[in-house]
Image (cartoon, grey):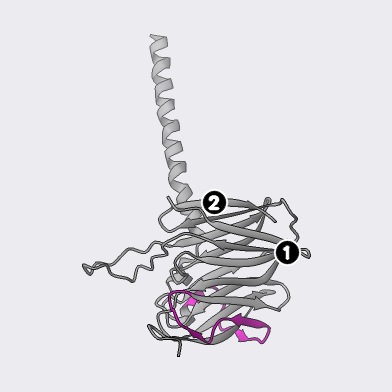
Amino acid sequence: MNNQRRATLKAGGGLGMLGLLAAAGLIKPELAEAAWNKGAFDAKTLDAAMSAMGAGKPMESADVQISAPDIAENGAVVPVGVVSNLPNTEQISIMIEKNPNMLAASFDIPAGTLPDVQTRVKMGQTSDVYAVVKADGKFYMAKKEIKVTLGGCGG
Amino acid sequence: MANPMRIRAAAKEGVTEVRVLMSHVMETGQRKDSSGALIPAHFITELTAKHNDKVVLSAQFGASVSTNPYLAFKFNGGAKGDKVTVSWVDNKGDSRSDEVQVS
């Protein structure tokens, strides 16, 4: 009789462990997604995107430079580079004012990495492109208009 | 599964420049297919680059980043033979990690 009781207890304990493992598995993906700033990436206006990033109204600064063409012949692939000359640059973000989702990319710059990033973005139409830089806890920005010519010969 | 990334890492005068070309559709969720149905969004959301075991860049992407995203950045240090690892995760939970030696 006693042996049977022990076997039952063991089986019950085993099930409990399985439940715990499943719960642990369910929690993990949520944690991973939390790092992505959904509010900022889903924002439909520049102000909303800025506030979701905690940027408020950043100051324009000549120390933030955008390198991008004045005219982009192909809106699907527009090269954009941002260089910050501000000390302690922590973050660089690229926003395109007239895109449905204006925040294109946000880079966290740890100490030892140069505040100099280049990427390529999509642009639906001619628009101002903003580079928002967080340095020493404050936000700065620069903007540049990029004209998009669709199906033209670059004229 | 996604195709491998093409990564180049070159050390010059104490600075290592890393260039990455990822292979990804980067679907915005705004486009429609031929029958008029919306194509669901599918894009890379997070990217991490490591030099040996130290994180040298972490990035968050939105749907406005181009198809087959390109990324270039520089970090101080790095020597020939060091390892640079780049990994990304997309909004459908796919992920990819590739590594290259600094040249």
The kind of residue tagged 1 is: Gly
The kind of residue tagged 2 is: Ser
Whether residue B30 appears in magenta in the rendering, the answer is no
Residue beneath disc 2: B97
Whether residue A4 is situated above or below residue A86 in the rendered picture: above
Answer left or right for B75 relative to B90. Answer: right
Residue beneath disc 1: A112
Q: Nearer the viewer, residue A98 or A34?
A: A98
Identify the residue at the far front of this view: A153
Identify the residue at the far left of this view: B35
Residue for point 56% across, 51% down: B98
Identify the residue at the far right of this view: B13
Whether residue B31 is situated above or below residue A65 in the rendered picture: above
State the CA–CA distance, disc 1 to disc 2: 22 Å
Residue A106 picture quarter: bottom right
Percent of width and height locating residue A77: 47, 74
Residue for point 49% across, 56% down: B89
Which subunit holds the residue at mark 1? Answer: A
Answer left or right for A155 relative to A61. Answer: left
Percent of width and height locating residue A29: 46, 50
Whether residue A39 is situated above or below residue A29 in the rendered picture: below
